Image: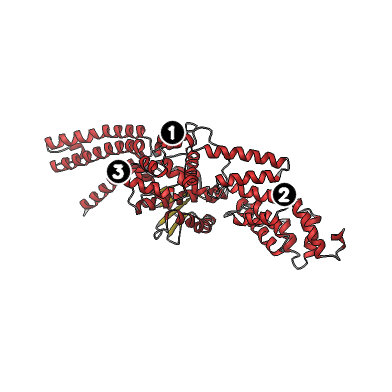
Amino acid sequence: MKAFSKVIALLSLLIFLAILVYFIVLSLNGVEGLAISFVISMLLIIPISISLYGMIKGNIAMLKIRKRIGSFVLFAVSIFYLLFIIALGLLNIILEETSKDEVPSLKESVLAVTNVFIPIAYKEGLLTEEYNGITFHFPKGEETSIDTIKSLYPKVKEELDLLYGADTPVDLTIMIYESVDELNSRTNKEKLSGFYLPSNQSIHIVSEKSGAPYQFQDSFTHEYTHYRTDQFLKHHHISSTSIPQWFNEGISEYVMNMHTFVDIDLNKEINFKDIDTNNDFHEARRNGFEPYLQSYFAVRELVLEHGKDVIPSILIRTKNDKDFYAAFQETTGMKIEEFQATFLNRREEINVLFEQAGEAEIKNEFKVAENLYLKIASLDPYDVYVERSLSYVYIKQGEFEKAMDTLKKMKETDISELYMMSELSLLKSLEDSLKYAEMAEEAIRKYNGETHYTSEFADAIRNNRSEPVIVYKELLNEELIDYKEIKIELLKRLKQQYPNEQWIQD
């Protein structure tokens, strides 16, 4: 029994040492990891030499090993550790230099998978919640992050169902981290706010409290898109290593920014083939390039020119052609080099038209501005800034119904558009006006974290909704209506509706 306890204790020690070395080597860069492996390997020569001496001599007195079998066990264990350490050092180099996996690199996946399946300090005390096939792991106090994902998930899923087809039963894990430092300490990368691991279908994301709510929502949308791209690849038996990193990232960036306006221009380009791998992609970020932005513009241009189906078409053709760039050329009719030379032309043309429209607005030439915005819409029907701008110039021209119809067609509306809709609704319905004003209030609460925020505009309606005349009087006297065109039209209609209200007639 005593001998058995010693064997168990020895095995436990050996396993602990193997895990410790595993973490030490893989947490370092390739060269440092190899150097540590070399030092440990040199140290292992000592027990190997001693065990060889013991097998020849018959015993090792200083270690109290009295039989050759004991020396042989020491020799076997030392050789095993020597091979394990050498393999670990070489693996560390291979994972860092040759990875072409999804986001993040295979090395990061190895580390993070370990975090998910081996109990570590971070997982202790985490809460767990199930939702529609998604398993959340999150620290206490981060319930708002989970609620945000739950409210965002149906919309994002719907967009990706349209792109990739209805999802198979969801089997996804989402881990919430309290800070960027907490997340990045487990990825061996810097400046990541989230990542997706295809190896165990898990999203790792920094909590909503760590930054602005929209950043958290963007991060979830980006990583969930990676998950759906990965599912699509698996469903069609397409090798993930055949898809360039820039295209994979571009898809996620495109979906993330689908209903927003990206007002940043690309000042410096890099050859697409130079950001094929995960390692090269992230290395480019250190050299002054913006590979995420370039990838976004590239995928957006593909969608504008060929429609959304171009994304799954290229992916499926890659499986058949066994080469992404051959599939790219077959689908688009362009070599990647030709595409590289022209993919920003549309954006540059649109930027010029926006400048001209802005100048027309300054000159109060709103019809000219309208025509310019319509031309932009023909070049890019998904540009949400055009819809916002058209609504504005319609109001300035007194075309209020056109303005409202344009706003209602928008899939996503921000705070300014909701207030615009609430003011336009004054011309027809106080109830509708309050509805949009309260939607704007809720958006501000989510955006700024001001849980009790209310607007003067909404309060004026809410507090006197049974007395419309009082509502209008407060809105006008307190100058709570921003658009003078709407104010003038409202007064005109009120004079007809309330002929006996002297303050209106005056």
Query: Which is more toward the observer, 171 or 144?
Result: 171
Q: Which mark is residue 396?
A: 2
For badge 2, the amino acid type reads Lys
Q: Residues within 10 Å of mark 1 (few under 14, many from 20)?
A: few
Mark 3 or mark 2, earlier in chain: 3
Find the distance from the CA under tag 2 to the CA under tag 1. Answer: 45 Å
Find the distance from the CA under tag 1 to the CA under tag 3. Answer: 42 Å
Image quadrant containing the N terminus: bottom left
Comparing labels 1 and 3, the label whose residue is closer to the camera: 1
**In this orientation, does residue 451 appear?**
no
Residue at coordinates 59% horizontally, 54% vertically from top-left? 410
Secondary structure type for disc 3: helix
Percent across and percent down for residue 376 are 59, 44
Q: Which mark is residue 18?
A: 3
The vertical placement of 203 against 56, above or below, is below
Mark 2 or mark 1, earlier in chain: 1
Find the distance from the CA under tag 3 to the CA under tag 2. Answer: 72 Å
Horizontal side, residue 114 vs residue 469: left or right: left
Residue at coordinates 44% horizontally, 35% vertically from top-left? 338
Horizontal side, residue 16 vs residue 192: left or right: left
- In the picture of the structure, the residue carrying the numbered disc 1 is 271
For badge 1, the amino acid type reads Asn
Query: Which is more toward the observer, 417 or 279?
Result: 417
Mark 1 or mark 3, earlier in chain: 3
Residue at coordinates 31% horizontally, 43% vertically from top-left? 322
Q: Residues within 10 Å of mark 3 (few under 14, many from 20)?
A: some
